[in-house]
Amino acid sequence: MNIVCFDMEGVFTPEIWVNVAKKTGIDALKITTRDEPDYDKLMKYRIGIMEENHITLRYIQEVIASLELLEGARDFFDWVRERSQAIVVTDSFVEFAMPFIGKLGRPLVLCHNLITDERGMITGYNLRQPDPKRQVVIAFQSLKYKVVGIGDSYNDMGMIQQADTGILYRPPDNVVKDYPSYPVTRNYDELKALILKAM
């Protein structure tokens, strides 16, 4: 039996933090997991910038509400679900992801939670567990699933490396350079072909 584990941002949705950066004019928020491999370092950096600029969770949610899925994302995801079990495994947060998940048809999504204070400011976050994306794949493999792992960033590499088949989708050049052994796809048609091959 197969199961396909997808990252969310960059695969189905725009990069949330890049769009917050555009809306606020704070270029420092454009840094994502495509640039910084250390997720904890990246989140602490973002929280510091939000505190300094008084950016609340509500404000970020308003930015997210204005965004749509990437073109063709829903049709592609429906195509996958006709052929396999499929879930979204993201290092985003419940507070960010749910509008997008509704637009994808409410698949199973595994993500984290934010910690906020009485001002509505983000002060921290709770991970499901250490190395969460890799652990999701290990769990499904223990249930005898053959796992396909798909993502675009450094934080996806645990999932991609652990999967029976790992695929990069529209990754930046630095990720391709650092992980040259994984196939690179640039559109949903190319991704479909590799998913079918993996099955």
Image: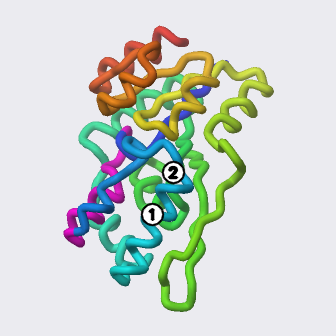
Secondary-structure class at tag 1: helix
Q: Quadrant of the image for the N terminus? A: top right
Q: Quadrant of the image for the C terminus? A: top right
Q: Position of residue 136 (x, y in %)?
A: 68, 37
Spatial CA span between label 1 and label 2: 31 Å
Per the rendered image, the range of residues in magenta is 11-25
Numbered-mark total? 2
For mark 2, what is the residue? 106
> Residue 45, labelled with which disc?
1
Residue situated furthest top in the rendering: 197
In the displayed structure image, the side of residue 50 where residue 173 appears, left or right? left
Q: Position of residue 60 (x, y in %)?
A: 37, 71
Give amino acid for label 2: Arg
Front one among 156 and 75: 156
107 is higher (above) or lower (below) than 156: below
Q: Position of residue 75 (x, y in %)?
A: 34, 35
Give amino acid for label 1: Tyr
**Colour basis:** rainbow
Residue at 78% over, 27% down: 143
Secondary-structure class at tag 2: loop
In the displayed structure image, the side of residue 154 where residue 29 appears, left or right? left
Q: Quadrant of residue 191?
A: top left
59 is higher (above) or lower (below) than 149: below
